[in-house]
Amino acid sequence: MGELELRHFARRIGLLFALIAGLLVFGTVGLSLSEGTNVWDSFVWALDIVATVGSIQAPTDVAGQIVKVVLIVLGVGTLLYALIAVTEFFVAGHLSGLLEDRRTRRMIDSLTDHYLICGFGRVGRQVARDLAAAGAKYVVIDPDPENRERAQAAGVRFLEGLASEDELLRSAGIERARGIVACVDDDAENIVITLSARELAPDIKIIARASAEHSEKKLLRAGADRVISPYKTSGTEMARLALHPNVSGAVELAPEYRMEEIEVTSGCPGSGCTIGEIQGGATIAALMPRRQLRRPAADRDHARRGRRARGHGHGADDEPARGAVRA
């Protein structure tokens, strides 16, 4: 059950209880005036009539009998409707859905250094698959109930709602997240998501999708670090394959591998060591001293401050390399 559905159910139950309370007040006052009983006895009498218990004798006065008829007609109908609403809540599985939502929120609250995927369409699902293959933790935000079912079937942490809402971004743990991917189909929504994310987490890495070319500059101005156009990217790749079919796959990696650029920082443990000493299970494919990219020699080249190393690794194989260049 989503947050909106839960609020709607709570409003229905609240309205029903208000109607029952109003009927009891009406019955208490009516019976007290018509039968001359005190307030407490009149309240118990009205409750007996509404609940159809029938343990108290019928009113003797005509006015009291009219009050009894009103209470039976309206009270019984209201109680039956309340019973149906509560039964529907349990039978339709809403309670289990509510418990599942709370369990998901507890899991999300325990996450750190995770990623937020805003939008679970075709692009968002591919992003989720690649992050999962790389062993990264992530949370999906999407307003579509159908995408919620897809995410639950795949065991994905999912929050239903608009990713542009600050409260939902906070619920997804944006303050603790490493990055956010805004890949909604609507460019305007991606711009709002980028603005909200940059305001809530000024240092977070933001990757945004742009369907239209004119939206790329707007997303960059809104605070996106990188803007990707699926159509432009796919078109460029298709043209490259057409022009150079023999070099296809030169820089393509399987999803379980990832390529990263690591900068040697001041005071890091690996400063001054050779590439072979720090690379661990990763493969350092290139070294860039003074903006010149070249292939490193593992036994001769050293990791020095300001240099950038580019390489790829499988899962946690590249952790020794990254740990060696962190201060």
Image (tube, rainbow, N blue to C red):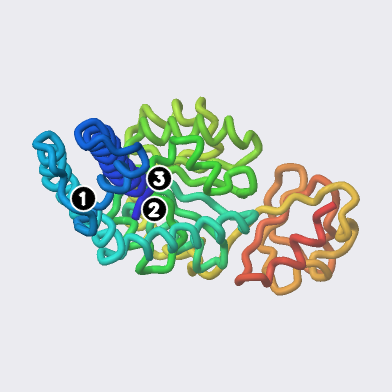
- Work out how far the residue at label 2 is from the one at label 3, CA to CA, in angstroms: 6 Å
The image quadrant that residue 107 belongs to is: bottom right
Whole-percent x, y for residue 92 in the image: 25, 64
- Which quadrant holds the N terminus? bottom left
Q: Which mark is residue 49?
A: 1
| Amino acid type, mark 3 | Cys
In this figure, which residue is indicated by the disc labeled 2? 124
The image quadrant that residue 137 belongs to is: bottom right
Q: Secondary structure at mark 3?
A: loop
Q: Secondary structure at mark 1?
A: helix
Mark 1 / mark 2, whichever is N-terminal? 1
Q: Is residue 256 above or below residue 175?
A: below
Q: Which mark is residue 144?
A: none
Query: Which residue is drawn at the image coordinates 19% and 46% (left, top)?
Result: 75
Whole-percent x, y for residue 204 in the image: 61, 41
**Image marks 2 and 3: residues in contact by CB distance under 8 Å:** yes
